[in-house]
Amino acid sequence: MILDGKAPTGPIEQSWDKHRFDMKLVNPSNKRKYKILVVGTGLAGASAAASLGELGYNVEAFCYQDSPRRAHSIAAQGGINAAKNYPNDGDSIYRLFYDTIKGGDFRSREADVWRLSQVSNNIIDQCVAQGVPFARDYAGYLDTRSFGGAQVSRTFYARGQTGQQLLLGAYSAISRQIKMGSVKLFPRTEMLDLVVVDGEAKGITVRDLITGEIRVHTGDAVVLASGGYMNVFYLSTNAMGCSVTAIWEAHKKGAFFANPCFTQIHPTCIPQAGDYQSKLTLMSESLRNDGRIWVPKKKEDCTKPANQIAEEDRDYYLERKYPSFGNLAPRDISSRAAKEQCDEGRGVGPGGRGVYLDFRDSIKRFGENVIRERYGNLFEMYERITDENGYQVPMRIYPAPHYAMGGLWVDYNLMSNLPGLFVLGEANFSVHGANRLGASALMQGLADGYFVIPYTIANYLVQTKPGKVKADHAECRKSIDEVKGTMKKLLSIQGNRTPFEFIRELGLLMWNNCGMARSKESLTEAIAKIPAIREEFWKNVKVSGTGAEFNQQLENAGRTADFIEFAELICRDALHRDESCGGHFRVEHQYADGEAKRNDADYAYAAGWEFKGVGKEPELHKEPLKFENIHLAVRSYK
Amino acid sequence: MSAHTSDDKTMSVKLIVWRQKGPNEPGRFETHLAKGITGHHSFLEMLDVVNEDLIKQGKDPIAFDHDCREGICGTCSTVVNGVPHGGQERTTLCQLHMRKFKDGDAIYLEPWRARAFPIIRDLVVDRGALDTLIQAAGYVSCHTGGVPDANAIPISKPDSDYAMDAAECIGCGACVAACPNGAAMLFAGAKVAQFAALPQGQVEAPERVAAMINAMKECGFGNCTNHYECQAACPKGIDVKFIARLNREFHKALFKAKAGAFIPLVEGE
Amino acid sequence: MRLLSDSIGRKAVVAVTGLFMVLFVVVHLLGNSTIFAGPDGINAYAEKLHGLGPFVWAFRAFMGVMLCLHVIFAILLTLENRAANPEKYAVKKMLKTTFAGETMIWTGLLLLAFIVYHLLQFTVRVTPDIVLGNDAKNRVDVFTMVFTSFRITPIVLVYVAAMITLFLHLSHGIQSIFQTIGLNNDKTMPQFGALGKVLSALFLVGYSAIPVLILAGILAK
């Protein structure tokens, strides 16, 4: 099947405005008759629920956390892009559009990216009005900084906690609607299944994480804003509870999963210290502005104290390989380079999984105080975790799985191929292509929630009769039975291995075979090994306690089971995409300098996968990507 | 080169953990040994080790709240040896590392304790009351869209920085847990102060402070007696000057709300 | 907005009534210091004070109201606070609060008892140690009355203990007033803190000096 993204035609500059006019509206007095279920309360989910509630729809919002304020959007540090052009440095909606398409290595839909760039400005206005304390200059106007290699200064920020402040803004908006009664909140509630009736999404089955109750919520539309799936690598910068479960269950009910192999690895994370480790912590990329990255030239130096390694025995490999960009080489390139050094046995720290990020020369040049002023909080964070003083010994860094560009396939209206199922934020695939630019994730989440879904959902709702499906519908009962069956099975196996052990095993396999560098061999191997892990899991997992209580092990087990199934899909997608682009690097396809070699003739499409059963090969549907405004070109950072 | 060599030594610590099956069940302390712990283990990773062990023995693992494990989501919530988050300055429990403990240490683990935070299980409590406070008035009542350009209203840098200092709160509830009175004044104060410092928030300032104070009472939080334990326990170092600001805003509202009219002294505005 | 039923309103009542009592304690100390000038000092001061007639009674009534409000609301708040924190930690380490801060309700109640005793003794003058008489200029001989009582060791001990209690109460209380009425910010916070410590120490030394010096025989007739 050829997938139709339903992108508007005509001049791109007018595409969104024209589309907004073309879409149908729901009569204000009818809005309250429609119930919308929103899963996830991060930037995308909370902003969507708040905006839809404000319009008068009857909204129910669900999150697995104890409060909407804890969604992992909160951890974003750097900032949020917008084409305001406040610094008068030549920015425009068109330039943000261009940068995002190019940064995504030409694997995103033009019209979606244009819309994102256009509404980016409204987001900043909205957040300021909510009382988000963005950084300001002494005249009282908003400050911006440059980010992620952009040539303009378009990133708005709130100290190192931009994600937190934006999320608290969206949280305040949803809280206001909760008070007014238009949004009903269900915290500590996890979506475990999608209810599809006559091909349309009409409800979700959830588990109350406190009581263990399994129940169905029906609605006229379902909005998934459940975030990304990077915990499939086990160690990632995601929160412990981040999972693929909501979108995976939707996928199993018929929603296409697009480009799952487009995953982003962030280069400046604190390395893993041991096998017990539960997550990786990211440090702002800005550290690379003043730090020099190196490894010892000789393997035998790797265990020596860094300060005892002579200058001539140090290999500043990024400066050597990319003389013009040096330590500021793009995320994917510097991540891969670090991995190469470590694979060659020249990595440092525990397990040889780390490279040095050295501030010695900058401290010599500017003095420790200047460095402290610029990065003091990061040095503190580093010391808290590693107990090492980054001013005295070089920091150690290593790349870590960070962000999922892939997700459920959606059309221009953010609706999946299942009518009534909308997908927002990191959970969908639409705008970042094969690689996301820094400070664009926050932008997308809020754009989708505040300024896209409130319009596009109406166009669907107006064609459907409200309250079509009730909780006693056969599909609802079937879904409940299925979920209960899964829970029962998980609890009854009583094997010898904990869910943690399985996700660790899976994560390691995924990281080694489907991580920063992938090959036909590594992917084929992974695809062969994953079913064995799955079978072992369903034979030998041990979950304590019962289903009718607060049971964190049961939650973990369910999420792990979904990750194991999903892992196979990533690998299949990565194997099928026989090119390198953005975050997807196939070692077979690279230029002599290690840059990704794209194959536009064969792969300029979004790959939407249709579920055909556990362990069965999924079916591929393609959405051809047309580039009418920006010409396909080699992404060069020389 | 670094301390990570000395941290590699393993140690054992004795955990004395509060176990409670549900909100209305009786609770008790249980002792568990955490073995094979290194200085690199974060506190929560140490608990992971203990739990893996408990599961394998067929016992109930210790329930504890956690999520981002990088000190920003505010989910982790355990009182360690009598101090919320364990007592390392400006550090959440997930960022506290075992190198701060010695081999053989006995460590007490208790849930946040306050009337407003009922226990769900073991170390997990229900902090929904903090959401209720925000729902009462912790927002600017602006609509999606229909707002002026972001640069239309300049805000002085000191005001903006002050608002940001207050806005750094992660809503973990350590302030309530540390307060001898189970009060949420630091939490509420930070929110009220953030908005009071910004022109966008000033419009609704009197209503906000009234609603917040009312909600605190309804949720069962106590009153402030100026011990400042909240600030000392706060992993973000939120300053008690924001409680003073809350008080000031209350007094301002008291006079402003009914300017020229009778100032009601008791119930019913 | 409700002054007497809202948490912060009630606290403000305790703070403001406390502030008036602190001011009274200042004035009272200045008045008492006239004893260092001998019988002529304090007896003249007492006579002048009593000569004010209705003003004295108005003032007494005002201070009585302040005291009652202070005590009632402090007790109410304390009861609410106990209710808000019913389950105690098995291990609790206080990081910042002081002994004075933690014992406010107890030092407060002790002071209330002391005030009752002090009024019965030197104002109503019904305790057994009281020696009443007039001085050479036919004024009430306050000096002799005070002097006689403070030659009795247990009474002096009670007074010194009460002043230590007052010190504790005010070393937390004074800075607390400014926090509660909302005057604290980055700059003023340490200043008000210092003011509280200096004033309460001054009260301790100033008030205790009288009974101690009399008992020690340094302040003599």
Image (spheres, coloured by chain):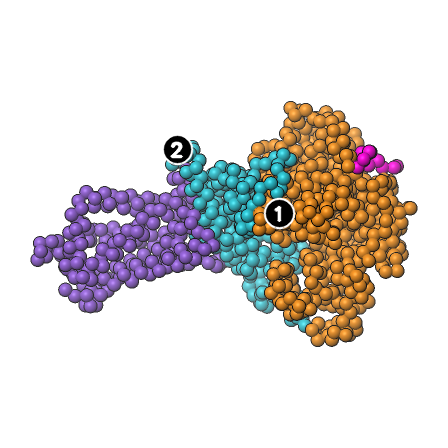
Chain colours: A orange, B cyan, C purple
Q: Which residues are magenta?
A: A1-12
| Residue at 29 percent of width and 58 percent of height | C162
Residue A431, by quadrant, is top right
| Residue at 86 percent of width and 60 percent of height | A593
Q: Quadrant of the N terminus of chain A?
A: top right
Residue A9 lies in the magenta-colored region: yes
Q: Which residue is mark 2?
A: B260
Tell me the number on the disc at residue A524: none
Tell me if mark 1 has few (under 14), some (14-19) or many (20+) residues whose alpha carbon lies within 10 angstroms of its own: many
Q: Which residue is mark 1?
A: A142
The location of residue C92, given as percent across then percent down, is 48, 57
Mark 1: amino acid = Leu
Residue A144 visible to an observer of this rendering:
yes
Secondary structure of the residue carrying tag 1 is: loop
Q: Mark 1 and mark 2 in contact (Cβ < 8 Å)? A: no
Mark 2: amino acid = Gly
The location of residue C71, given as percent across then percent down, is 33, 47
Q: Disc 2 or disc 1, which is closer to the eye?
A: 1
